[in-house]
Image: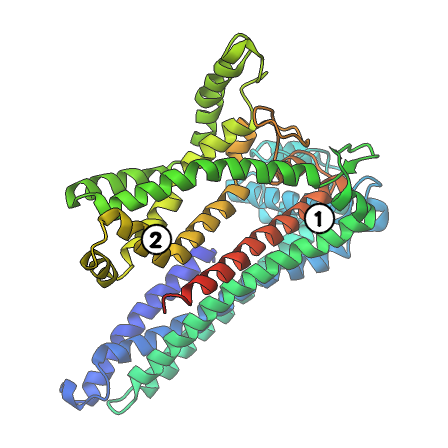
Amino acid sequence: MPTYWLVLSLLVLAAVGYVLGRNRALQTAGGDTRALHSLPNYYGLNVALTSLVPALGVLIVWMLVQPVFVDSRVSTLIPDSAVPEDATLDLVMSDVRRVADGLDEAVEQGALTPSEARQLDAEATDIRARLGEVGVALGSDVRPEVLRAAQRYRQLTSVGKTAMSIVVAVLALGGLAWSYSQTHKDFRARNVVEKGVLALLVVAASLAILTTIGIVFSMFFETINFFGLHSWKDFFFGSTWAPNFRGDSELSILPLLWGTLYISFVALLVSVPIGLFAAIYLSEYANGATRSFAKPLLEILAGIPTIVYGLFALLTVGPMLADVFAKGGLLGVEWMTGATSVVTAGVVMGIMLIPFVSSLSDDIINAVPQSMRDGSLGLGATQSETVRQVVLPAALPGIVGAILLAASRAIGETMIVVMGAGAIAKFSLNPLESMTTITTRIVSQLTGDTDFASPETLVAFALGLTLFVLTLGLNVLALYIVRKYREQYE
């Protein structure tokens, strides 16, 4: 049974359980809701959640664990001689999965019968051509050991899906039957449902934390592999970024870090004053009609895809700056040789960040108690003095948080930098020169036909981990500033 049909069946079963549980509670109370311990809906929700949640949890865990288990079993079928010198077992297993998916597609389209797919012989049949007929493109001919592993992969996957469907169905039906049998008018359904919902909330919070931990560990272990192949001194203290997949690479993060911080600084120079002034105007000076029109219009900027901003930088802002600063332009000196530069990316990124600063700052300023404004005005201060000396100091922790959030967003931006700043990693104070950032290099190192056993590819994980530590540091700094200034107003 396909997974989506299994999920749909669980939802239908939960709906049926809700109706059955609610009706049974009413029947045991003789139709009088006053005789029930809880509202009728709680009895229905208890049966629905008991039949749905455990089965759905097992389904999710099974879908996560099964591929790992199947890979570990199938990988033992690949002899060391079948792994090329310039590849790894993981790359061979990716070919196995691709062939297995191709066989599934061929069976689904009717090009092969299930028995033919199980009995195919790579030496007697051109597997690549057969799969190409159904639209499955393979990069090379399928070797016999890869085909055998793919057939075994399909077999284990099929058995696993069947077992999963049986286990999930038994859990769902068993949960429904058990909770239905427990339903009567004195059953504390509300207490049980509220505890169950609380448990779901705890699980959701835990998943968010565990996801972050998983991301960090995945980058951490690959970073260790990178430093096993490349000197950490060159990475942290070198001065050149020059990857070469043929060897002798210089992979220093410092030029990339400089470009990242420089472009982000220019973006904040644009976004912070404009966004903060816009927030002050909308919250303190604009009337209701102006605010209701301007605030949504300003926040539209946050919904524009970053690739559109990148095109804007490439086709509009960059050429405009190049016309101004090119030879014969400003003062007759050639300040800028192309359309890509730090200023190009920084200005466009700053425009993108304006709604982040303005919207958050506006909410924080509006949260300042009106009594503080009234007290200042009552003592004779003007409105501008009230804003400068009362409102902004009281809202400063939130404003700092908004600025640091915008800084984190700027540090992690990719597409605007790719199209507006160029791809040159270097140290320079000239904002009219091309530079690049950490995120751009991560994309570049992981794009194309990459070898995950080479330092030129693994460096992407070291760059990612460094970027994570950088943004984490910004968040810690924000918490420190917020706590320091909040003490003055509480």
In the image shown, does 158 or 110 lie closer to the viewer? 158
Residue 279: give x, y in percent of width and height. 31, 45
Measure the alpha-carbon separation of dots 2 and 1: 58 Å
Mark 1 burial class by Cα count in 10 Å: few <14, some 14-19, many 20+: many
Residue 349: image location, x then y, percent: 47, 35
Q: Is residue 322 left or right of residue 199?
A: right
Residue matched to label 2: 392
Q: Residue at x 15, y 88 (%)?
A: 34
* Quadrant showing the C terminus: bottom left
Identify residue type, mark 1: Met
Q: Position of residue 241 (x, y in %)?
A: 73, 34
Q: Residue at x 70, y 41 (%)?
A: 253
- Residue 339 screen position, x and y as percent: 53, 19
| Residue under label 1 | 93
Q: Is residue 429 above or below residue 455?
A: above
Q: Is residue 487 left or right of residue 92?
A: left
Nearer to me, 108 or 55: 55
Q: Residue, x 36% and y 41% (percent of image)?
A: 275
Which residue is at the front of the view, 400 or 213? 400
Seen at 65% across and 47% down, the residue is: 97
Q: Secondary structure at mark 2?
A: helix
* Numbered circles on residues, count: 2
Would you place residue 241 above or below residue 190 in this image? above
Q: What amino acid is labelled 2 in the image?
A: Leu
Q: For residue 52, which quarter of the picture?
A: bottom left
Between 364 and 129, the one lying in front of the other is: 364
Q: Are dots 2 and 1 in contact, CB under 8 Å?
A: no
Q: Secondary structure at mark 1?
A: helix
